Image (cartoon, rainbow, N blue to C red):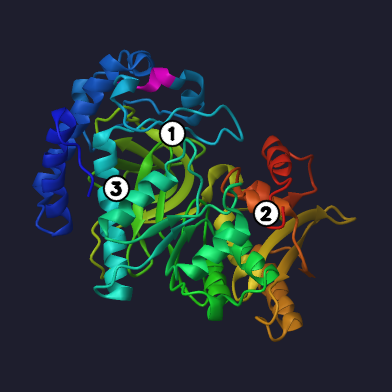
Amino acid sequence: MWLPTQGPAADFAARYLELHRAFYGRTLTDTALADWRTRQLRTVLDQVSTGSPFYARHLKGVDLAAITPDDLSALPYTTKADLREEMLDVLSRPLADALFFYETTGTTGRATPCPRDGREITASNAHITESWASIFRHHFGGHAPRIGLMGPTEVHSFGDTLGDIARNVGSLNAKIWPYSPVIGFEKALQLMKDLELEVICCTPGVALTLAKAAEHFGYDLRRDFSVKLLFVTGEMCTPALAHNLETVWGADVYNILYGSQEAFVIATACRNKRMHLSQTNYLVEVVDPESGVSQGPRGQGELTVTMLVDGVKPLVRYRTGDAVAVEESDCGCEMPGDLVRIVGRTLDRLELGGRRFTAGQIETAVMTGVTGSAGYQVVIERDASGQDRLTVRLELLKDLVEAPGSLADTVRTRAAEALGVPVAVELSEGLDPIVSTGAFVSWKAARIVDRRSAPDHETRVARKMAENRGYES
């Protein structure tokens, strides 16, 4: 594992990894974890209130000495709008202290700076390493699998972070981002075959597009490739979509981690395909997305995190915009930490037939029971009487579905029952290219065509981005 070798970051790494080993060894006492959280919260609050121009103003008048890990309610929230407005003024250490500079994609607003220093890299990557090592032991025993990393690299953490994790677990890794002009889908598929890659890490959307590209270029997914695991991240992937991916690829699918450029890796997957919070790195709150009232560390609502790692850009009560369910772990795996389930962005909630649904509920309604599909899209309209109705567009891969008509009937019945509105199903030979933009804009812009209103900003951005994104381009 890469570690800083000198200075305060090296001192932090030594202290942190001692705690980390105890956390994963199940020898860390509740008292020791509470002491760590209290000490690190105090360090972070002292640092941001004096080192960050934004937080010096944002926290002015708050009695920081009275703040404890059990009660953060006196602290104001930090929002995505704050990060876009304040930019580098959010940093509480000099930019020169960072080892990497990343940004958010900037597709739906101003791209915000997300630098990382040695402390942040050590603490975040340690949890991913434990996750991958556990899953690889479960599937491969002592064999270190060959990994294909399919994600952006320019001012984005994907390649650096997951390349480091691959090294930590002793695996060969090939960075083969298929949307790169240097690689492309045809070259990515050829390298997958020639290198006999066993694990592919990408978004669910890329995994589906890759399957379509393989069909286009004459490959058979099971005969020509050695893929045993798909590690998906970057987009929502419900169990229903994951099951469909498994039927397409003939591989196990793991929703491998949850996080963001701004907040790093908040949770990681276990061998049981459940997600565990990195509780040595964050204080977690679940808040009501409308009122902002905190429910504490568990419940259903919007995930809010306070970082405990005093790096270049620790965030205090940062509202992620993600709708989650957090509960105490009852998992029999090797991973500690509460369980978290991501159900979509709070902004992606939709009203259908007078009821509100999360993105996860809609995807589950559409994709439950679906196999062999290369993707889906949902069209929402109103009929002549003003009632909502849906049309589900499904693209099926050749020779993977024996009875497409029966599958369409199943989707129609289950989705209508789950969502409470009439549903029609169209089997398409090719979906709108906008469905490939999910990780870069939003699930809603990629998957939903809402004809009840004019296209919003995100949809317009996604539509523009969709141009020239096909595997034949």
- CA distance for labels 3 and 1: 16 Å
Q: Which residue is mark 1?
A: 102
Task: Identify which amino acid the numbered label 3 is placed on.
Answer: Asn
Residue 206, placed above or below residue 465: below
Residue that protrudes farthest toward the right in the picture: 384
Q: Tell me whether circle 3 and circle 2 mark residues in contact (CB < 8 Å).
A: no
Residue 417 falls left or right of residue 226: right
Task: Identify which amino acid the numbered label 2 is placed on.
Answer: Val
Which portion, as a residue range, is magenta? 88-92
- In front of the other: 160 or 335: 160
Verify whether residue 187 appears in magenta. Answer: no
Residue 242, placed above or below residue 28: below
Q: Which mark is residue 125?
A: 3
- Whether residue 281 is visible here, answered yes or no, is no
Give the quadrant of residue 335: bottom left
First in sequence, mark 2 or 1: give its number. Answer: 1
Residue 384 falls left or right of residue 435: right
- Whether residue 429 is visible here, answered yes or no, is yes
- CA distance for labels 2 and 1: 25 Å
Q: Which mark is residue 435?
A: 2
Q: Looking at the image, is mark 2 or mark 1 nearer the viewer?
A: 1
SS assignment at label 3: helix
Q: Residue at x 70, y 59 (%)?
A: 377
First in sequence, mark 3 or 1: give its number. Answer: 1
Task: Identify which amino acid the numbered label 1 is placed on.
Answer: Tyr
Residue 382 placed where, x, y %?
Answer: 82, 53
